[in-house]
Image (tube, grey):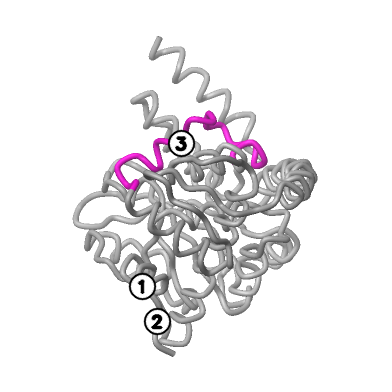
Amino acid sequence: MVPDAFDRLLIAELTAPVDRRIAGLVDAILGPCQPLGVLFYGSGLRQFDPDGLFDFYVILEKLSDWHQSTAARIANEWLPPNVQFAEARIDGRILRAKVAIITLAQFQARARPDSIDTTIWARFTQPVRLVWVRNDAAADALLMAIRQSVITAAGWAARLADGAQSPDFWWTNLFAHTYEAELRVETKSRGSVIVAGQEKRFATMLACAWDAAGISFSDIEGLWSPRLSERQRTTARRAWRKKARRGRWLNVMRLIKAAFTFRDGARYLAWKIERHSGRSLPLSDFEARHPLLCLPWLLWRARHVFRRRR
C-alpha cells in the first residue's frame, strides 16, 4: 500500500531523529525485553532536559512480555497502562523516565472514538517518535494506531465546537475538554502551549484527519468550519458529557491503582522532592522496595526537607 499524505506526515514524525542519549536510556529501560515498540513523547521530546523526566510508552504484544509481578500484570489487564519510574546513567548523567506499559490491542481499543478513555488518542495527536521497534510489521501496526488516535481526536474536535474557527482553536478547545475529563492538573489554557510554535503542523494534521474521517470543511480566510449538522453536534456533545463523567471516575481508579503498581514510586517521589526543593531524600533498599509500607515515614522525612528549605 502506498502511503498517503497523512501517513507520510506521521512517518516523518515517527522516524525523525532524537538525541542519541534517548536511545541509551531506552536500551537501559528495556534490558532483555523485546516489545513491539517504544513511543517517546512529551516535553522531553520538545526540548531535551537532562534534569527533567522523559515520557515513554512501551507497546507489548502481550503483557507477559514485560518484567512485572503477577498482581501488576492483572492490574494492567484490568486498567492499563501500568506506570513505572526508571533511571539510568547515560554519558555520566542520570536520566530519568516515566514509562507506561500497554499492549498493542489495549492501545488500539483506546484509540477508537467510542473509548471512554481519552488519554491515548488525546496524547498521541501530539508529536511522537518511534525510538525502538521490533520489525516492519510492528512499525506498520503502531503507525495505524497513531493514525487512528489523530482521526478520533480530530472527529471529536469538529463536534465539540461550531462556527468558523482557526485550526489551532479546534485543537486547543479539544485539549481543554480532554484535560477536564482526565482530571489533569493543567489549566484549560495548557492546550495553547502545546500548539504554540507548531500551528502549521497541527493545521496540516487536522486537515488530513478530517479528510480521513470523511469530514469536509470550508476554509474562509484561514477560518475552518466543518460541515456537520446541529443534530450531529448535539448528539456528540451529549455523548461527550457521558464520556467525561465516566472518564473522571476511570482516572480516579487509575490513580488508586498507581498507588499499588507504580514501580519504583519511592524513587520517583525522592526525585520530585530533590528537583523542586534542591534537597536530596536518600532511600534505603527497603524503602525503595516497599514504598507503600514506608510512605508515612517518607512523607515525614520529606516534610523536614521542605521545612529546612524554608
Report crowding for label 3: few under 14, some 14 to 19, many 20 or more residues within 10 A (C-alpha): some
Query: Would you name the residue on which mark 1 appears?
Result: 11
Q: Earlier in the sequence, mark 2 or mark 1?
A: 2
Cα separation, mark 2 vs mark 1, equals 9 Å
Report crowding for label 2: few under 14, some 14 to 19, many 20 or more residues within 10 A (C-alpha): few
- Per the image, label 1 sits on a secondary structure element best described as helix
At which x and y percent is residue 146? 50, 67
- The reply to whether dot 2 and dot 1 touch (C-beta < 8 Å) is yes
Mark nearest the camera among 2 and 3 is 2
What residue range appears in magenta? Answer: 179-199
Report crowding for label 1: few under 14, some 14 to 19, many 20 or more residues within 10 A (C-alpha): some
Q: Which mark is residue 3?
A: 2
Residue type at mark 2 is: Pro
Q: Quadrant of residue 305?
A: top left
Q: Earlier in the sequence, mark 2 or mark 3?
A: 2
In the displayed structure, does residue 9 sit left or right of residue 188?
left
Q: Earlier in the sequence, mark 1 or mark 3?
A: 1
Cα separation, mark 2 vs mark 3, equals 46 Å
Residue type at mark 3 is: Ala
Q: Is residue 198 magenta?
A: yes
Cα separation, mark 1 vs mark 3, equals 37 Å
